[in-house]
Image: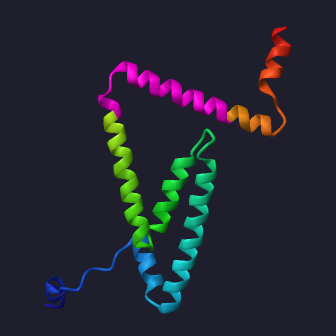
């Protein structure tokens, strides 16, 4: 009889996994504030680190989106920014897929050229002149 009453209850079941754990922390005011601060700091550090990595070859944008996903656990504005970024990326990829081989080749060449310039400037900043080194080997 108790089991039947539990089945008819309008109280939602307790969530499991990470969301259930987060709900448990949020159940107290101190826990909710602490969680908001920790999530905010971790997410912000990830977004800033990702933005620093964007001009360099590597996972810059992936880290930015991961940081936004972390922030979206606690902040509604981050969820909206993440959704906007995902929809913009999806729209760009759909546009890219509809293009012919010439446009795709131009995008590829521009991307590779930009990455090469970024790597060259980065190495030059560290004191390595790759072009001068290549000239030594060729002459």
Q: Which secondary structure type mostly characterizes the magenta part of the structure?
A: helix
Residue 94 against residue 88 in the figure, above or below: above
The residue positioned 49% from the left and 67% from the top of the image is 71
Q: Quadrant of residue 103?
A: top left
The x and y percentages for residue 95 are: 32, 35
Q: In this view, does 104 lie above or below 122?
A: above
| Magenta stretch contains residue 17 | no
Q: In which quarter of the image is residue 125?
A: top right
- Residue occupying image coordinates x 48% and y 55%: 65
Q: In this view, does 12 lie above or below 105?
A: below
Q: In this view, does 67 lie to the left or right of 73?
A: right
| Residue 27 image-quadrant placement | bottom left
Q: Position of residue 2 (x, y in %)?
A: 18, 91
> Which residue occupies 39% across, 72% down?
76
Image x and y of residue 30, in percent? 53, 90
Please identify the quadrant where the C terminus is shown: top right
Q: In which quarter of the image is the N terminus?
A: bottom left
Residue ID at (60%, 41%): 58
Residue 97 screen position, x and y as percent: 32, 31
Looking at this view, name the residue that lies furthest to the top.
Answer: 139
- Magenta stretch: residue 97 in it? yes
Position of residue 81 relative to residue 127, above or below, is below
Please give the range of residues in magenta.
96-118
Q: Which of the pair 83/25 is nearer the observer?
A: 83
Count the marks: 0
Q: Which colour scheme is used?
A: rainbow
């Amino acid at each position: 009889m108790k089991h039947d009453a539990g089945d008819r209850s309008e109280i939602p079941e307790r969530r499991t996994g990470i969301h259930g754990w987060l709900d448990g922390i949020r159940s107290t005011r101190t826990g909710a504030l602490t969680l908001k601060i920790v999530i905010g700091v971790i997410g912000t550090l990830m977004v800033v680190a990702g933005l620093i990595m964007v001009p360099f070859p590597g996972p810059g944008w992936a880290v930015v989106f991961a940081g936004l996903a972390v922030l979206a656990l606690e902040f509604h504005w981050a969820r909206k920014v993440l959704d906007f970024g995902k929809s913009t990326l999806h729209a760009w990829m759909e546009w890219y897929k509809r293009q012919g081989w010439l446009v795709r080749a131009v995008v590829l060449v521009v991307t590779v050229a930009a990455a090469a310039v970024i790597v060259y400037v980065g190495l030059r900043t560290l004191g390595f002149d790759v072009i001068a080194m290549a000239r030594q080997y060729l002459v």
